[in-house]
Image (spheres, grey):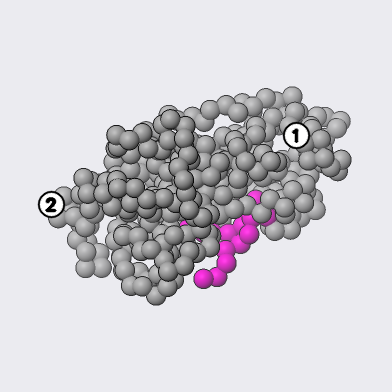
């Protein structure tokens, strides 16, 4: 698999001169913790996000967790597009296409790196999944069948893919989103450890503003003889969530200021705890709890993501999440589950 592009423009987001809900943020008086103190406590560091990650300047609002705890939250609004780059490529167009013309998909082993969606991968899907019914290309023209229109994208973005869009490589475009498309994330300003760990729905938000999504329903996708292509960054697009990630491949990684060789930061979970890459600078993994979390003196409690093909970022929510959170939009192409009521 070729390395994802990391030519992202990194800069800081200004949060000065804002007033809301009784809170005032300015360059002289800020409700965001000082950068020095962020190293010694869990919680979001807004300055770590890529320039353009938010469609509006982040602000602090009153909120209530699903456990009924009254607290304050960062309100983060996004446009559904990853900041700093254009998504793609996703589906190859011909069985002769190489890795540059296609994206990536989960390994059938459910661990390790994503596999490249090349033309040969499409050609040999029957062998890869040991199922002779697979045929995601036209045997006369050698062209790959893919969802080339918004209508096709919508027809495939269902738990039960419409028959005419089965045996397709599924991809959608950002242009299919409504003009006023927006997602809002409410994330506690200070994480609150939960009495019991919670189920993962929307995992969180990446440093480029894109959603870190919950697990994709692999059985439903493969049962419809579809491949819901990711780009090499581990994400894809639908009209409910915009561009969102199902795997971490390094595209949003950013080194947090530390001297211990810790893994790079990739984003934040909806409970407010930081999410880091799986391995540290020496290629080692930490000992983690059931949520894929651990604690140290610098970062406090935090998560480390699973490998790209495990179809998960973290195992459960260590902290309380917010009662109303629009980050989880709806079913991605190929049958991702719709949002569940709180």
Taking 136 as reference, is 61 left or right?
Answer: left
Q: Residue at x 57, y 41 (%)?
A: 308
Q: Quadrant of residue 144?
A: top right
Residue tagged by mark 2?
Answer: 28
Q: Are marks 2 and 1 in contact (CB under 8 Å)?
A: no
Residue tagged by mark 1?
Answer: 122
Asked which secondary structure carries label 2, the reply is loop
Q: Is residue 243 magenta?
A: no
Please say if 180 is above or below 250. Answer: below
Taking 264 as reference, is 181 left or right?
Answer: right
Choose between 312 and 339: the one closer to the eye.
312
Please say if 282 is above or below 271. Answer: above
Percent coordinates x, y for residue 265 in the rendering: 39, 41
Q: Which residues are magenta?
A: 327-342
Classify mark 2: residues with Cα within 10 Å, few (<14), some (14-19) or many (20+): few
Q: Judge whether residue 44 can be spotted in this image.
A: no
Prevailing secondary structure of the magenta residues: loop
Taking 103 as reference, is 84 left or right?
Answer: left
Percent coordinates x, y for residue 237 in the rendering: 57, 47
Residue that sits furthest to the left in the current view: 28
Percent coordinates x, y for residue 23 in the rendering: 21, 64
Classify mark 1: residues with Cα within 10 Å, few (<14), some (14-19) or many (20+): many
Q: Residue at x 49, y 45 (%)?
A: 305
Please say if 169 is above or below 8. Answer: below
Q: Quadrant of residue 83?
A: top left
Mark 2 / mark 1, whichever is N-terminal: 2
């Amino acid at each position: 698999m070729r390395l994802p592009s990391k030519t992202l423009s990194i800069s800081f987001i200004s949060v000065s001169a804002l007033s809301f809900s009784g809170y005032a943020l300015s360059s002289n008086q800020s409700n965001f913790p000082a950068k020095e103190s962020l190293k010694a406590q869990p919680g979001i560091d807004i300055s770590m996000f890529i320039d353009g990650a938010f469609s509006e300047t982040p602000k602090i609002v009153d909120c209530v967790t699903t456990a009924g705890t009254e607290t304050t939250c960062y309100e983060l609004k996004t446009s559904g597009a990853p900041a700093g780059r254009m998504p793609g490529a996703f589906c190859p167009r011909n069985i002769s296409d190489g890795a540059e013309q296609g994206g990536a998909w989960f390994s059938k082993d459910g661990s390790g790196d994503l596999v490249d969606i090349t033309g040969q991968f499409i050609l040999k899907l029957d062998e890869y999944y040991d199922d002779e019914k697979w045929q995601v290309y036209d045997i006369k023209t050698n062209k790959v069948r893919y969802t080339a229109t918004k209508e096709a994208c919508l027809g495939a973005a269902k738990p039960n893919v419409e028959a005419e869009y089965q045996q397709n490589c599924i991809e959608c475009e950002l242009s299919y989103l409504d003009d006023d498309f927006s997602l809002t994330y409410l994330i506690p300003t200070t994480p609150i450890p939960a009495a019991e760990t919670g189920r993962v729905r929307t995992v969180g938000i990446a440093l480029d503003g894109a959603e870190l999504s919950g697990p994709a329903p692999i059985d439903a996708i493969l049962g419809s003889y579809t491949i819901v292509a990711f780009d090499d960054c581990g994400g894809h697009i639908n009209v409910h969530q915009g561009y969102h990630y199902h795997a971490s491949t390094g595209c949003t990684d950013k080194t947090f200021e530390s001297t211990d060789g810790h893994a790079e930061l990739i984003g934040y979970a909806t409970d407010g705890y930081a999410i880091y890459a799986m391995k540290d600078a020496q290629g080692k993994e930490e000992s983690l709890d059931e949520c894929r979390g651990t604690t140290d003196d610098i970062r406090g409690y935090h998560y480390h993501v699973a490998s790209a093909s495990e179809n998960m970022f973290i195992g459960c929510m260590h902290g309380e999440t917010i009662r109303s959170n629009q980050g989880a939009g709806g079913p991605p192409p190929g049958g991702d589950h719709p949002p569940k009521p709180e």
